[in-house]
Amino acid sequence: MTTDTPGAAPAAAAPPVTDVLRAEHIRKSFGAVTALRDVNLRLGRGEVLGLLGDNGAGKSTLLKILCGFQAPDAGRILLNGEEVSLRSVTHARALGIDVVYQDLALINELSVFHNMYLNREYRSGPLLNNRKMRTLAKQHLAEMGVRIPSVDVEVAKLSGGQRQGIAVARSVYSDAKILLLDEPLAAMGVKEGALILSLVRDLKKRGDVSIIIIAHNYAQVLEVCDRVNLLQHGEITFDKASAETSVEELTDIVVEEYRAALQERQNGG
């Protein structure tokens, strides 16, 4: 039985956890090369975060740590407010974190529906249940607005935007709650890029998936992201709501970085 101290205020309830993912003081080195110095990143529930940075800034390394592919040398990762140690990509997926790389990990020679259920196929006894996978793939792609000629077509015959859409849909319908998109707009034409941006908007409306987009195109990122981070020299140096910044501000920061690097070289640094 519990007793209350007379006149004592009731204990305050713990505030709800609004960040689905946090990375705190992440460091990672490869021999003498320091890729990440002290990264602090947060991702809100249902938020779309743009992660920007020049080549070599450490974006890919951070992505690999967040999806369980690599372990950090120091720092910690919190999922829904609880510290986790991501042992592998499979472990991260089991916790709801999935990544879509530029190469998409799709098998070009397989059909769309076989790619959608790759390594998690439905079976009827020893045989693949192609009918069920075909039906579900058609349904899921339609729900996400990914338009393709047929789920029976080989992935190799589709456009880059369509393939990207299939890879994203596969992750979402594998119960991913945190989606990491590695340069989803790279090498995309205007039409294909628009398809991916539309897909991200639709996911944002659902509100049950949080997304980090690694990108170079500031205009496209600001168009769909709620917030942007800039990764420079292994640290997050910029964190603002998209509505509070601009392409010009981001460009000026990067230009200043180039000028400082050039000056250092000229001075023999």
Image (cartoon, helix red, strand yellow):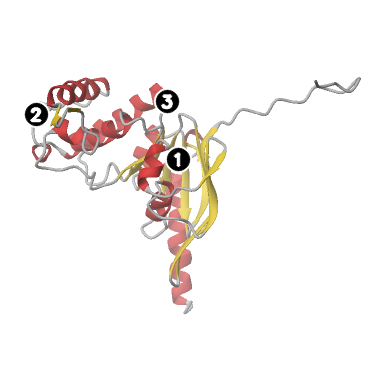
Estimate the spatial distance between the alpha carbons at disc 1 and disc 3, rounded to whole Å.
27 Å
The kind of secondary structure element at disc 2 is loop
Q: Image point 22% across, 25% down: which residue?
A: 141
Query: Which quarter of the figure has residue 156?
Result: top left
Q: Residues within 10 Å of mark 1 (few under 14, many from 20)?
A: some
Marked residue nearer the N-terminal end (2 or 1) = 2
**Residue at numbered disc 1:** 246
Secondary structure type for disc 3 = loop
Where is residue 135? Give x, y as percent: 17, 20
The image shows residue 241, relative to residue 61, as above or below, that is above
Farthest residue, direction right: 6
Question: Which residue has dot 2 on it?
Answer: 152
- Residue placed under numbered mark 3 in the picture: 208
**Residue 18 image position (x, y, % from top left):** 56, 31
Pick whichever of labels 1 and 3 is earlier in the sequence: 3
Name the front one of labels 1 and 3.
3
- The kind of residue tagged 3 is Asp
Q: Is residue 157 found left or right of 251 in the rendered image?
A: left
- Amino acid carrying mark 1 in the image: Ser
Q: CA distance from mark 2 to mark 3?
A: 29 Å
Q: Work out which quarter of the rendered image holds the N terminus and state it.
A: top right
**Nearest the camera: 222 or 246?**
222
Characterize the local packing of mark 3: few (<14), some (14-19) or many (20 or more) Cα atoms within 10 angstroms. Answer: some
* Residue depicted at x 15% and y 26%: 129
**With 100 as the anchor, is 49 left or right in this view?**
right
